[in-house]
Amino acid sequence: MEKNIEAVFGRIIRRHRERCGLSQEDFADVAQIHRTYVSSIERGKVQVSIGIAQKLAVALGIPLSRIWSDIERELGPVKRPQPRGKSARTESP
């Protein structure tokens, strides 16, 4: 399964939209965005702004935090990168 965040976000939006029984066109109308943009979002082809994500959540009748939780659940635990240590080279005094 794709772990690209845009693809995961799109799948989650589509899943919630379908559970609401909304077509892409009706969903776009409620969210006040263009239907082709909804299609691009659901296919993971675009990065959405936080403002658009909020519009989508409102149109779905769910809190934005629910979408983020779904994303985190699908992506799995986040591993924080470790800082790189000093260079392996040693300097002469």
Image: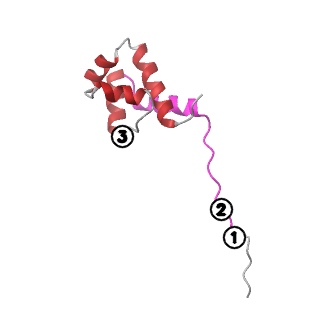
Residue farthest toward the top in the current orientation of the protein: 21
Horizontally, is 71 left or right of 33 in the view?
right
Please tell me whether residue 69 is drawn above or below residue 88 in the rendered image. above
Horizontally, is 21 left or right of 25 in the view?
right
Query: Is 79 in the magenta?
Result: yes
Q: Amino acid at mark 2?
A: Arg
Q: Amino acid at mark 3?
A: Ser
Q: Which residue is mark 2?
A: 84
Residue 28 image point, x, y percent: 29, 23
**Residue at 48% across / 25% down in the picture?**
11
In what quadrant of the picture does the C terminus appear? bottom right
Q: Quadrant of residue 35?
A: top left
> Across the whole image, how many numbered discs are drawn on residues?
3
Residue 64 image point, x, y percent: 40, 31
Q: Amino acid at mark 1?
A: Ser
Which labelled disc corresponds to residue 49?
3
Numbered range of the magenta stretch? 61-85
Please tell me whether residue 55 is drawn above or below residue 47 in the rendered image. above
Residue 25 image point, x, y percent: 29, 18
Q: CA distance from mark 1 to mark 3?
A: 38 Å
